[in-house]
């Protein structure tokens, strides 16, 4: 068997056969499903939420599925792509043929593997899985092969303005039952900023807060050594570099963090420089997580196949939904890489549940990101998963187990907010942009 045949065989897993047989047994004698209508629901229940959902209706009375096309920074583009391009293509299609719908939607816009095409693809994919589960009377995870774990462990987000407040934040999460805690000092890049107006700068131009990677590479290992001294060694520590570093600085940071035994360091390189992971892997044992910005298989696949990372860190909605996430997890299993799906921040409860249903069923699971939603979201989206003592729990209802109250969603229309991505424009002392 050659390499390509081996990789293909990894993706034809027993769970696929079991899912097909289970669904067929539950729906014997029922007519084939057709998509009859798709409704777009765009809403912003809070300032940092720009959510675009769908309800996909079928020819079986009362049977519909929900999905998410979440791209906070291009929400209006996602909404237009759904309404003007994809929904007319989906109407009349067979709702049972999830893989076929995934593949046909994937090539429908000709240019593929982009953020908008992927989130739109994820919306129909997740809605069809929801429909299939509801029709079978089973939660989606049962159709994916059933549970291999009782609940989904999460990592929490700790932060502080200085070493002591960071230690207090980590300890608080530990007291709340979390075994895994990600720590940032004052946000992404914190510990590496020179305050506005300070330091050597050009005579005119940028005078704001500036990132300095040498300072960052010095301060962050000192911070985590402080956490080990104050909080101890039982907590599993994570940190997100958020692509701010050059390759040489990334290697230095990874080596300096070895002594504090990180659970993982996330996105230590920008996607454009992932080839340097081979040098990091050769010189340090600090575990690496990568992939938050990935949208294309040629970004994540070589890192997994060559065992250059320890955790793949994609967002399920941004790679095309459950169908693709399950294939990535199967690939990870073959190469000893674990998943750490990125479902925090501005992400929504449907996307959180997509990761949850996959995570419950995969041997290659590593960790999932914590995301707790405010009361207005819980009211708007009944069935939202709940967090207890560091674990995520769905409700075991058929399908994804979540719905959207359209009347409540309508009270929070989608906002025009062109400032929502300003935080990505970090600058150095000379005024140049620092990635991401």
Image: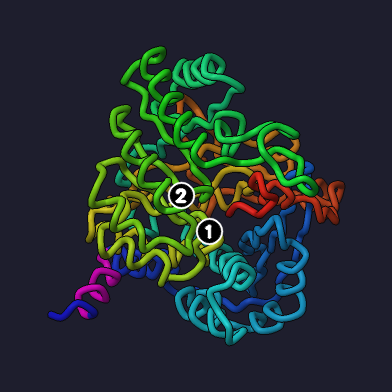
When asked about the image quadrant of residue 130, the answer is bottom right
- Whether 46 is drawn above or below 335: the answer is above
Q: Quadrant of the N terminus?
A: bottom left
Q: Main secondary structure of the magenta part?
A: helix
As drawn, the residue found furthest toward the front would be 203
x then y, percent, for residue 353: 53, 49
Q: Nearer the viewer, residue 110 or 265?
A: 265
Residue 356's x, y, as percent? 46, 47
Nearer-the-camera pick, 365 or 284: 284
* Front position among marks 2 and 1: 2
Q: Earlier in the sequence, mark 2 or mark 1?
A: 2
Left/right of residue 343 with respect to residue 279 in the rendered view:
right
User: Within the magenta stretch, is there residue 163?
Assistant: no
| Residue bearing mark 2 | 267
- Label of residue 201 in the image: none
What's the residue at 69%, 63% (across, down)? Answer: 54
Quadrant location, the C terminus: bottom right
Residue shown at 25% from the left, 69% from the top: 10
Question: How many numbered circles are shown?
Answer: 2
Q: Is residue 432 above or below residue 306?
A: above
Which residues lie in the magenta part?
A: 5-14
Q: Circle 1 is placed at which residue position?
A: 293
Q: Is residue 39 visible?
A: no
């Amino acid at each position: 068997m050659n390499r390509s045949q081996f990789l293909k065989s990894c993706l034809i897993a027993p769970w696929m056969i079991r899912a097909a047989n289970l669904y067929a047994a539950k729906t014997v004698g029922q007519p084939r499903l057709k998509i009859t209508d798709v409704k777009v629901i765009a809403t912003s229940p809070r300032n940092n939420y720009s959510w675009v959902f769908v309800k996909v209706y079928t020819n079986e009375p009362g049977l519909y599925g929900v999905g998410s096309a979440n791209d906070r920074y291009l929400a209006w583009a996602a909404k237009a792509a759904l309404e003007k391009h994809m929904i007319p293509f989906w109407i009349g299609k067979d709702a049972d043929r999830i893989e076929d719908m995934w593949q046909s939607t994937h090539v429908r816009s000709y240019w593929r593997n982009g953020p908008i095409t992927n989130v739109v693809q994820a919306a129909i994919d997740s809605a069809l899985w929801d429909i299939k589960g509801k029709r079978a009377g089973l939660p989606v995870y049962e159709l994916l092969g059933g549970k291999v774990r009782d609940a989904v462990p999460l990592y929490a987000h700790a932060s502080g303005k200085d070493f002591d407040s960071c230690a207090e934040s980590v300890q608080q999460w530990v007291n709340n039952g979390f075994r895994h805690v990600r720590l940032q000092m004052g946000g992404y890049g914190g510990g590496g900023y020179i305050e506005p107006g300070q330091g050597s700068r050009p005579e005119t131009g940028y005078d704001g807060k500036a990132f300095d990677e040498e300072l960052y590479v010095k301060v962050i290992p000192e911070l985590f050594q402080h956490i080990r001294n104050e909080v101890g060694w039982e907590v599993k520590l994570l940190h997100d570099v958020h692509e701010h570093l050059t390759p040489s600085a990334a290697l230095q940071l990874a080596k300096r963090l070895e002594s504090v035994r990180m659970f993982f360091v996330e996105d230590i390189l920008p996607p454009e420089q992932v080839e340097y992971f081979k040098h990091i892997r050769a010189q340090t044992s600090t575990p690496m997580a990568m992939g938050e910005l990935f949208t294309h298989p040629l970004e994540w696949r070589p890192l997994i196949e060559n065992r250059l990372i320890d955790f793949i860190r994609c967002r399920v909605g941004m790679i095309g939904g459950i169908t693709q996430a399950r294939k990535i997890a199967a690939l990870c299993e073959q190469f000893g890489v674990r998943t750490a799906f990125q479902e925090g921040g501005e992400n929504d409860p449907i996307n959180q549940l997509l990761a949850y249903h996959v995570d419950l069923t995969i041997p290659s699971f590593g960790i999932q990101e914590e995301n707790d939603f405010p009361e207005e979201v819980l009211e708007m989206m009944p069935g939202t998963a709940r967090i207890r003592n560091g674990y995520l729990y769905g409700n075991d209802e058929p399908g994804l187990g979540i719905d959207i109250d359209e009347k409540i969603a309508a009270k929070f229309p989608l906002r025009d907010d062109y400032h929502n991505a300003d935080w990505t424009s970090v600058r150095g002392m000379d005024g140049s942009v620092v990635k991401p």
